[in-house]
Amino acid sequence: MKIRIKFRKQGTMKFIGHLDVMRYFQKAMRRADVDIRYSEGFSPHQIMSFASPLGVGLTSNGEYLDIEVKSSDSSAEMVKRLNEAMVDGFEILSFCLLPDDAKNAMSFVDSADYTIGFRKDREPSDPEAFFNGLLAFYEQDTIIITKKTKKGEKELDIKPLVYELSVVRDSSDQRAPLNFVELGRPLIFMKVSAGSADNLKPELFLQAYCEKTGYEYTPFTFEIQREEVYGPDGRPLDSYGEEL
């Protein structure tokens, strides 16, 4: 049986890298007594794959991993058991059965939503000017950046990789994240390409804008949160399964 699990990653867990997250979930599967399937051979391991590794320092309301199990209780029971095995910062949101011919989440990712806000001590003197300038920057026909590769540097137009950009100003906006009220300030909403071939990190777009306009940009300027991950037809990854 193929299973897709959706979870949140919040709080101090944002400082845990992908490999440690993977090792943590392997232990959580054992603690929750999930009847997970193991590979064959001399060094068997749990059959598990994550949709799209999240960068260190980012939080998320929509992370996914696929596993294979030999048997399972109901989705509600499995969510309950896994959450009892979770530490603060991780929360299981759904546990869905996938069709036998479903592609694994890693190869199926097409795009992702992000919300981005300034850290409290990093806001510009005129936030409205920053947001208005950002929206105008997005309306350009091309946005050329210089990207470093193993073979050197090359110019890349990232405009086609940004599918949508807007400013979320209050909680009535459908794009407002779950913790918008806690944040209490306007946020940038971005939908970007997240496939294996064309994968754009929101930081690259923000850095390009800041460099052009003279705003200071450092890795600590913004708080970035992934909200959802989508398949090729624009549906969230958990919508391809059904509850047990």
Image: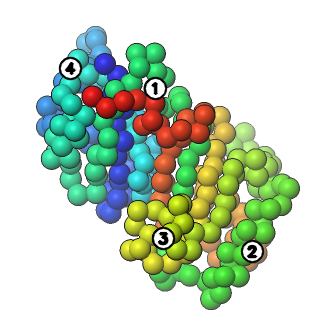
Res. 57 visible in picture: no
Q: Check the image and name the residue furthest to the front.
A: 172
Name the residue beneath numbered marker 3: 171
Q: Are marks 2 and 4 in contact (CB under 8 Å)?
A: no
Name the residue beneath numbered marker 1: 104
The vertical placement of 34 against 99, above or below, is: below
Earlier residue among tags 1 and 3: 1
Q: How is the image coloured?
A: rainbow
Identify the residue at horizontal 39%, vertical 24% (top origin). Answer: 98
Circle 4 residues within 10 Å: few <14, some 14–19, many ≥20: few
- The quadrant in which residue 233 appears is top right
Q: Are marks 2 and 3 in contact (CB under 8 Å)?
A: no
The vertical placement of 105 against 2, above or below, is: below
Mark 4–mark 3 Cα distance, whole angstroms, equals: 41 Å
Earlier residue among tags 4 and 1: 4
Residue nearest the viewer, comparing 65 with 171: 171
The picture places residue 157, in percent across and down from the top left corner, at: 79, 49
Res. 53 visible in picture: yes
Depth-wise, is mark 4 or mark 1 nearer the camera?
4
Mark 1–mark 2 Cα distance, whole angstroms, equals: 39 Å
Identify the residue at horizontal 56%, vertical 82% (top origin). Answer: 123
Depth-wise, is mark 4 or mark 3 nearer the camera?
3
Name the residue beneath numbered marker 4: 71
User: Which structural element holds mark 1?
Assistant: loop
Circle 1 residues within 10 Å: few <14, some 14–19, many ≥20: some
User: Which structural element holds mark 3?
Assistant: loop
Is 120 positioned to the left or the right of 145 in the image? left
Residue nearest the viewer, comparing 90 with 231: 231
Name the residue beneath numbered marker 2: 133
